[in-house]
Image (cartoon, grey):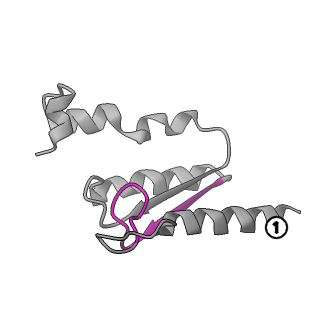
Amino acid sequence: MNPFRRIFGFRSVEELYRNDSSANYLANVSVPIVLINARDDPLVHPDMLNIPQAFVKTHKNSLYIETEHGGHLGYYDGGYILPRAVTWLDRTVVSLVTALANNSQ
């Protein structure tokens, strides 16, 4: 059971996802965007990965990156006691922005 469902007063997990999904806001995106999902994210059901895949097919200034592993919220990186200060997501975003900046010059 998803604890957020009860905390925020939703009657079901389906109602929670229907109301709080970022997919509800994709139609409002008008700037270039990068969407990143991990297949093993415990909060995003694999069936929901078709949403960003479909979005990038119809929005030319968008990029979808899907990884096998990464979990949820920032791709935790390192050990349980001493995590790395700079995560996989941090390194990936810096690399991506650097590549885009170099490519636009």
Tell me residue 23's x, y (percent).
42, 41
| In magenta segment, residue 46 | no
Magenta stretch in the rendered image: 62-77
In front here: 5 or 50? Answer: 5
Tell me residue 4's x, y (percent).
20, 37
Q: Residue furthest right?
A: 105
Q: Identify the residue at horizontal 36%, vertical 39% (top origin).
A: 21
- To which residue does mark 1 refer? 102
In front here: 43 or 23? Answer: 43
Q: Identify the residue at horizontal 68%, vertical 42% (top origin).
A: 31
Tell me residue 53's x, y (percent).
47, 57
Q: Identify the amino acid type marked 1.
A: Asn
Residue 84 appears in which quarter of the rendering? bottom left
Residue 72 appears in which quarter of the rendering? bottom left
Q: Identify the residue at horizontal 31%, vertical 61% (top origin).
A: 41
Tell me residue 38's x, y (percent).
38, 65
Give the left or right position of residue 50, taking residue 80 as reference: right
